[in-house]
Image (tube, grey):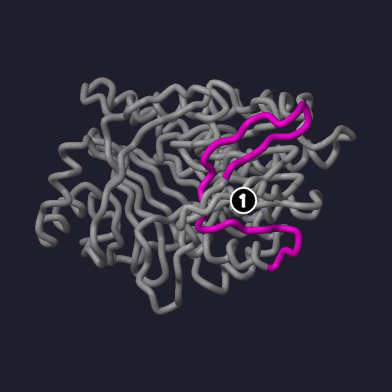
Amino acid sequence: MAQAIEDFDLVIVGGGIVGLSAACALAPMVARIALVNKIPAPTWSAESDYSLRVSAVNLASQQLLAEIGVWDQIQQMRCTPYHDMVVWQSLAESEVHFSATMTRHSSLGAIVENNVLLQALSRRVKTLANVTCYEPSSMQQFSALSDNSVLIEVEDEQGQSQRLTSRLLVGADGVHSKVRSCAGISATQQDYQQAGVVCTVRTEKSHQDTAWQCFTEDGPLALLPLAGQQCSIVWSLPKAEAEQMLALSDESFNARLSVASEYRLGSLQIASKRASFPLAGSQANEYVAQRVVLLGDAAHAIHPLAGLGLNLGLEDLVCLQQLIKVSDRELGSERVLQRYQRARKTENASMQQALEAIDKLFRQPQPWLRQLRSLGFTASNRCQPIKMAFMRRALGLPL
């Protein structure tokens, strides 16, 4: 007996934040959507400790999340708006201070646990009548069925297979994207030889609803505000040093972290377990193929020093959404996909290159470079047009 084939207009592979957001954002425009998700959203409750992975959600991303009906729920669950951002260089007096008072907005963004985003989006997807979820399931392969559709083979945890057809296949399945590899799209990888150490800390002083970032010669240290006198830290370090930080006693780690932050928030006390993740950049050499489009980390991954990774992925989605909305061509048309690639590939590659250059610049130990960087900080802090240009990019909205 031949295996039944389910027909869809759109199949999304990947149930992370970008994939779930894509299902929500495209549901009003597409008749039948399938979401293939290997790992269901984690459980979350208000009593649970802060999870180690958080995202700085900028105003443009908040606007998208509001439009798809989840931002109010996220605010009710747990998130911390920040109104200011202070960036400075270690062992130097100069800093750059960004403030929401410079704009017409009430905040610069919000720190949200990834688990909160996943939970809210997953709940929303399950309310959409035209979205069918295959989870936990994974895509095995896909092939062109004709010029206007692809055939996707999906397998669940029990090894049961399902065949789906789609006019457009969206790869939102992360940096090791199966969709990308099956489409024959190569990616340029850049190992930064660094790891991001993450944990939650209690601060002696108030964080003042401010995101703090110190550029040290080992790598940037970010202290991201959470409720009360707590912060989530992301400390980018050479791999060997990151391993050492994980092995230290809590007392020794607290001391090293407090010194690295130059006591901006006083003494820091660890309030969670510690973990680390490797830092690497990635750029897909093509963002599209026949009836295939890549979003988020499947297309690009960048250094976390500016907190833009998730926001760039959601910008991909907004771009694709708008192109589909205004196009009079069928879903998955080559012209629409090429327009998406032109709009997003250069933007994302330029951002990756800029962040890599900044990271490299601030890890150079020469005294004359430290003085030059200090002068740059001072000039940037005094020049309103420069500050506004930085803020415009960070917020993702026109100012």
**Residue beneath the point at 58% across and 38% down:** 393
The residue drawn where x is 53% and y is 31% is: 180
Circle 1 residue? 61
Q: For numbered disc 1, what is the local secondary structure? A: helix
The span picked out in magenta is 127-153
Query: Is 7 left or right of 297, judged from the image as shown?
Result: right
- Relative depth, front residue between 45 and 357: 45
Q: Looking at this view, name the residue that lies furthest to the bottom.
A: 47
Three-letter code for the amino acid on which mark 1 is drawn: Ser
Which of these two is toward me, 203 or 117?
Answer: 117
Residue 58 visible in the shown view: no
Q: Nearer the viewer, residue 335 or 62?
A: 335
The answer to whether residue 69 is magenta is no
Occupied quadrant, residue 311: top right
User: In the image, residue 14 lies at what x, y percent?
Assistant: 54, 47
- In the image, is 15 to the left or to the right of 104? left
Q: Quadrant of the C terminus?
A: top right
Tell me, yes or no, whether the highlighted magenta stretch contains residue 147: yes
Q: Quadrant of residue 218?
A: top left
Q: Residue at x 45, y 77 (%)?
A: 46
